[in-house]
Image (spheres, helix red, strand yellow):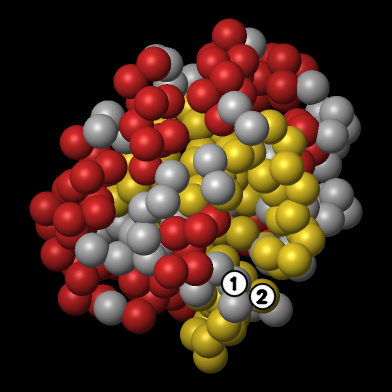
Amino acid sequence: MLLFPAIDLYDHKVVRLVKGDYAQMTVYSEDPLGTAKDIEAMGGRWLHLVDLEGAKDGTTPNFDVVSSIAKETGLNIEIGGGIRSFETIDKYLSAGVSRVILGTKAVTDKAFLEEAVAKWGEKIAVGVDAKDGKVAVKGWLEVLDVDMFDFLLNLRDMGVKTAIVTDISRDGAMKGTNLPLYDKLSGLQGIDITASGGVSTLDDLRALKKMDIYGAILGKAMYNGAIKLEDALKLVNEG
Protein backbone atom coordinates (compact mmCIF):
# COMPACT_ATOMS: atom_id res chain seq x y z
CA MET A 1 0.00 0.00 0.00
CA LEU A 2 1.17 3.51 -0.81
CA LEU A 3 0.85 6.38 1.64
CA PHE A 4 -0.15 9.78 0.31
CA PRO A 5 0.49 12.59 2.81
CA ALA A 6 -1.89 15.39 1.90
CA ILE A 7 -1.42 19.10 1.52
CA ASP A 8 -4.61 21.05 0.93
CA LEU A 9 -3.89 24.49 -0.48
CA TYR A 10 -5.84 27.71 0.01
CA ASP A 11 -4.35 31.16 -0.49
CA HIS A 12 -0.85 29.62 -0.74
CA LYS A 13 -1.24 28.05 2.73
CA VAL A 14 -1.55 24.51 4.08
CA VAL A 15 -5.08 24.13 5.38
CA ARG A 16 -7.65 21.49 6.30
CA LEU A 17 -11.42 21.55 6.13
CA VAL A 18 -13.96 19.59 8.16
CA LYS A 19 -16.29 17.54 5.94
CA GLY A 20 -15.49 19.78 3.00
CA ASP A 21 -16.87 22.87 4.71
CA TYR A 22 -14.96 25.99 3.67
CA ALA A 23 -16.34 27.74 6.76
CA GLN A 24 -14.48 25.23 8.94
CA MET A 25 -10.92 25.84 7.79
CA THR A 26 -7.76 25.51 9.86
CA VAL A 27 -4.43 26.90 8.63
CA TYR A 28 -1.57 24.58 9.56
CA SER A 29 1.30 26.26 7.75
CA GLU A 30 2.04 29.24 5.57
CA ASP A 31 4.92 27.35 3.92
CA PRO A 32 3.61 24.50 1.72
CA LEU A 33 7.03 23.93 0.13
CA GLY A 34 8.60 23.56 3.57
CA THR A 35 5.89 21.10 4.54
CA ALA A 36 6.53 19.08 1.38
CA LYS A 37 10.27 19.04 2.06
CA ASP A 38 9.61 17.81 5.59
CA ILE A 39 7.47 14.98 4.22
CA GLU A 40 10.23 14.01 1.81
CA ALA A 41 12.85 14.15 4.56
CA MET A 42 10.80 11.69 6.63
CA GLY A 43 10.81 9.19 3.78
CA GLY A 44 7.64 10.11 1.93
CA ARG A 45 7.60 9.23 -1.75
CA TRP A 46 4.21 10.56 -2.83
CA LEU A 47 2.32 13.77 -2.14
CA HIS A 48 -1.41 14.36 -2.54
CA LEU A 49 -2.14 18.00 -3.31
CA VAL A 50 -5.56 19.64 -3.51
CA ASP A 51 -6.17 23.21 -4.63
CA LEU A 52 -9.28 24.03 -2.62
CA GLU A 53 -9.72 27.38 -4.33
CA GLY A 54 -9.53 25.72 -7.70
CA ALA A 55 -12.08 23.12 -6.62
CA LYS A 56 -14.66 25.86 -6.24
CA ASP A 57 -14.08 27.93 -9.35
CA GLY A 58 -12.00 25.85 -11.76
CA THR A 59 -8.89 28.06 -11.74
CA THR A 60 -5.29 27.36 -10.64
CA PRO A 61 -4.56 30.07 -8.04
CA ASN A 62 -1.96 27.90 -6.26
CA PHE A 63 -0.13 26.73 -9.37
CA ASP A 64 3.13 28.43 -8.39
CA VAL A 65 3.12 26.49 -5.10
CA VAL A 66 2.57 23.19 -6.90
CA SER A 67 5.25 24.00 -9.45
CA SER A 68 7.81 24.88 -6.78
CA ILE A 69 7.17 21.62 -4.92
CA ALA A 70 7.61 19.66 -8.15
CA LYS A 71 10.86 21.45 -8.93
CA GLU A 72 12.40 21.51 -5.47
CA THR A 73 11.56 18.03 -4.18
CA GLY A 74 11.85 14.51 -5.56
CA LEU A 75 8.30 13.64 -4.53
CA ASN A 76 5.81 12.06 -6.88
CA ILE A 77 2.91 14.48 -6.92
CA GLU A 78 -0.75 14.03 -7.66
CA ILE A 79 -2.88 17.17 -7.82
CA GLY A 80 -6.62 17.74 -7.83
CA GLY A 81 -8.99 20.64 -7.46
CA GLY A 82 -10.75 22.43 -10.29
CA ILE A 83 -8.98 20.72 -13.19
CA ARG A 84 -11.54 21.09 -15.95
CA SER A 85 -9.59 21.71 -19.18
CA PHE A 86 -6.94 19.98 -21.27
CA GLU A 87 -4.82 23.11 -20.93
CA THR A 88 -4.80 22.82 -17.14
CA ILE A 89 -3.91 19.13 -17.28
CA ASP A 90 -1.02 19.87 -19.61
CA LYS A 91 0.06 22.81 -17.45
CA TYR A 92 0.39 20.63 -14.36
CA LEU A 93 2.02 17.66 -16.10
CA SER A 94 4.49 19.98 -17.83
CA ALA A 95 5.39 21.41 -14.41
CA GLY A 96 6.50 17.97 -13.24
CA VAL A 97 3.34 16.62 -11.61
CA SER A 98 3.07 12.83 -11.89
CA ARG A 99 -0.69 12.46 -11.91
CA VAL A 100 -3.65 14.79 -12.33
CA ILE A 101 -6.92 14.10 -10.52
CA LEU A 102 -10.15 15.01 -12.27
CA GLY A 103 -13.24 15.50 -10.15
CA THR A 104 -16.30 17.46 -11.21
CA LYS A 105 -15.33 17.37 -14.89
CA ALA A 106 -14.95 13.57 -14.87
CA VAL A 107 -18.48 13.19 -13.56
CA THR A 108 -20.21 15.72 -15.76
CA ASP A 109 -18.34 15.32 -19.06
CA LYS A 110 -17.71 11.72 -20.11
CA ALA A 111 -16.29 12.72 -23.49
CA PHE A 112 -13.71 14.96 -21.82
CA LEU A 113 -12.60 12.16 -19.50
CA GLU A 114 -12.35 9.65 -22.34
CA GLU A 115 -10.18 12.02 -24.37
CA ALA A 116 -7.96 12.82 -21.37
CA VAL A 117 -7.40 9.11 -20.66
CA ALA A 118 -6.69 8.45 -24.33
CA LYS A 119 -4.10 11.22 -24.39
CA TRP A 120 -2.41 10.87 -20.99
CA GLY A 121 -3.24 7.33 -19.83
CA GLU A 122 -2.28 6.51 -16.26
CA LYS A 123 -1.42 10.14 -15.55
CA ILE A 124 -5.16 10.76 -15.30
CA ALA A 125 -6.85 9.77 -12.04
CA VAL A 126 -10.40 10.48 -10.91
CA GLY A 127 -11.45 11.73 -7.52
CA VAL A 128 -14.73 10.15 -6.47
CA ASP A 129 -16.23 12.05 -3.57
CA ALA A 130 -19.11 10.22 -1.93
CA LYS A 131 -21.92 11.26 0.37
CA ASP A 132 -24.37 8.53 1.42
CA GLY A 133 -23.24 6.42 -1.52
CA LYS A 134 -23.77 9.18 -4.09
CA VAL A 135 -21.18 11.19 -6.02
CA ALA A 136 -20.55 14.80 -4.95
CA VAL A 137 -19.01 17.54 -7.10
CA LYS A 138 -17.96 21.21 -7.11
CA GLY A 139 -15.89 21.07 -3.94
CA TRP A 140 -18.55 18.82 -2.34
CA LEU A 141 -21.11 21.57 -2.65
CA GLU A 142 -23.45 19.51 -4.86
CA VAL A 143 -24.53 15.85 -4.54
CA LEU A 144 -25.69 14.09 -7.70
CA ASP A 145 -28.04 11.15 -8.14
CA VAL A 146 -25.14 8.98 -9.31
CA ASP A 147 -24.30 5.74 -7.48
CA MET A 148 -20.64 5.73 -6.47
CA PHE A 149 -20.01 2.03 -7.08
CA ASP A 150 -21.59 2.11 -10.54
CA PHE A 151 -19.53 5.18 -11.36
CA LEU A 152 -16.30 3.40 -10.39
CA LEU A 153 -17.18 0.48 -12.65
CA ASN A 154 -17.75 2.90 -15.50
CA LEU A 155 -14.39 4.55 -14.84
CA ARG A 156 -12.63 1.19 -14.94
CA ASP A 157 -14.32 0.25 -18.20
CA MET A 158 -13.26 3.62 -19.62
CA GLY A 159 -9.61 2.86 -18.88
CA VAL A 160 -9.09 4.95 -15.75
CA LYS A 161 -6.34 3.30 -13.70
CA THR A 162 -6.61 5.15 -10.38
CA ALA A 163 -9.53 6.48 -8.33
CA ILE A 164 -9.30 8.42 -5.09
CA VAL A 165 -12.45 7.69 -3.10
CA THR A 166 -13.38 10.11 -0.31
CA ASP A 167 -16.19 9.60 2.17
CA ILE A 168 -17.13 13.22 2.83
CA SER A 169 -18.82 12.39 6.12
CA ARG A 170 -15.48 11.20 7.53
CA ASP A 171 -13.08 13.71 6.00
CA GLY A 172 -11.32 15.86 8.57
CA ALA A 173 -13.66 14.66 11.32
CA MET A 174 -11.15 12.38 13.10
CA LYS A 175 -13.80 9.67 13.47
CA GLY A 176 -11.96 6.94 11.63
CA THR A 177 -12.17 5.96 7.99
CA ASN A 178 -15.06 4.05 6.42
CA LEU A 179 -13.51 0.59 6.50
CA PRO A 180 -16.59 -1.34 5.25
CA LEU A 181 -16.69 0.91 2.19
CA TYR A 182 -13.04 0.40 1.33
CA ASP A 183 -13.24 -3.33 2.05
CA LYS A 184 -15.94 -3.54 -0.61
CA LEU A 185 -14.01 -1.37 -3.05
CA SER A 186 -10.76 -3.29 -2.55
CA GLY A 187 -12.35 -6.20 -4.39
CA LEU A 188 -12.67 -4.20 -7.61
CA GLN A 189 -10.36 -5.55 -10.29
CA GLY A 190 -8.68 -3.37 -12.86
CA ILE A 191 -8.75 -0.05 -11.00
CA ASP A 192 -6.53 1.07 -8.11
CA ILE A 193 -8.47 2.55 -5.18
CA THR A 194 -6.95 5.12 -2.82
CA ALA A 195 -8.81 5.59 0.46
CA SER A 196 -9.31 9.20 1.49
CA GLY A 197 -11.12 10.74 4.41
CA GLY A 198 -11.05 10.02 8.10
CA VAL A 199 -7.78 8.12 8.58
CA SER A 200 -7.30 8.89 12.27
CA THR A 201 -5.15 6.13 13.75
CA LEU A 202 -2.45 3.66 12.78
CA ASP A 203 -5.12 0.98 13.17
CA ASP A 204 -7.02 2.59 10.28
CA LEU A 205 -3.92 2.29 8.11
CA ARG A 206 -3.25 -1.24 9.35
CA ALA A 207 -6.78 -2.30 8.39
CA LEU A 208 -6.57 -0.67 4.95
CA LYS A 209 -3.23 -2.33 4.29
CA LYS A 210 -4.69 -5.71 5.25
CA MET A 211 -7.40 -5.17 2.63
CA ASP A 212 -4.59 -4.80 0.07
CA ILE A 213 -6.01 -1.49 -1.07
CA TYR A 214 -3.74 0.51 -3.40
CA GLY A 215 -3.24 3.62 -1.27
CA ALA A 216 -4.34 5.75 1.65
CA ILE A 217 -4.30 9.51 2.10
CA LEU A 218 -3.12 10.93 5.39
CA GLY A 219 -4.31 14.44 6.17
CA LYS A 220 -5.60 16.00 9.36
CA ALA A 221 -4.30 13.24 11.65
CA MET A 222 -0.78 14.02 10.45
CA TYR A 223 -1.17 17.72 11.22
CA ASN A 224 -2.75 17.47 14.66
CA GLY A 225 -0.30 14.83 15.88
CA ALA A 226 -2.71 11.89 16.07
CA ILE A 227 -0.46 9.99 13.66
CA LYS A 228 3.26 10.57 13.25
CA LEU A 229 4.20 10.46 9.59
CA GLU A 230 7.32 8.41 10.35
CA ASP A 231 5.18 5.75 12.07
CA ALA A 232 2.67 5.71 9.22
CA LEU A 233 5.40 5.32 6.59
CA LYS A 234 7.05 2.55 8.57
CA LEU A 235 3.74 0.71 8.84
CA VAL A 236 2.83 0.85 5.16
CA ASN A 237 6.36 -0.06 4.07
CA GLU A 238 6.60 -3.14 6.31
CA GLY A 239 6.53 -6.52 4.64
Quarter of the image with the C terminus is: top right
> For the residues marked 2 and 1, what is the alpha-carbon distance in whole angstroms?
9 Å
Residue 110: which quarter of the image?
Answer: bottom left
Element under disc 2: strand
Locate residue 110 relative to residue 206 in the image: left or right.
left
Locate residue 147 relative to residue 177 in the image: left or right.
left
User: Answer yes or no: do the residues labelled 2 and 1 have beta carbons within 8 Å?
Assistant: yes
- Find residue 201 and report its horizontal and vertical position in percent: 84, 36
Residue 131: assigned label: 2
Residue at 84 percent of width and 34 percent of height: 224
Q: Amino acid at mark 1?
A: Trp
The residue pinned by badge 1 equals 140
Q: Amino acid at mark 2?
A: Lys
Task: Give the mark nearer the N terminus: 2 vs 1.
Answer: 2
Other-residue count near label 2 (Cα within 10 Å), few / some / many at <14 / 14–19 / ≥20: some
Question: As rendered, which of 186 and 86 lies closer to the eye?
Answer: 86
Residue at 59 percent of width and 72 percent of height: 140
Question: As rendered, which of 23 and 159 lies closer to the eye?
Answer: 23
Q: Is residue 187 visible?
A: no
Does residue 103 sit above or below 230 in this rendering? below
Residue 227: which quarter of the image?
Answer: top right
Question: As rendered, which of 63 and 224 lies closer to the eye?
Answer: 63
Instruction: State which mark lies toward you, 2 or 1.
Output: 1
Q: Is residue 12 visible?
A: yes
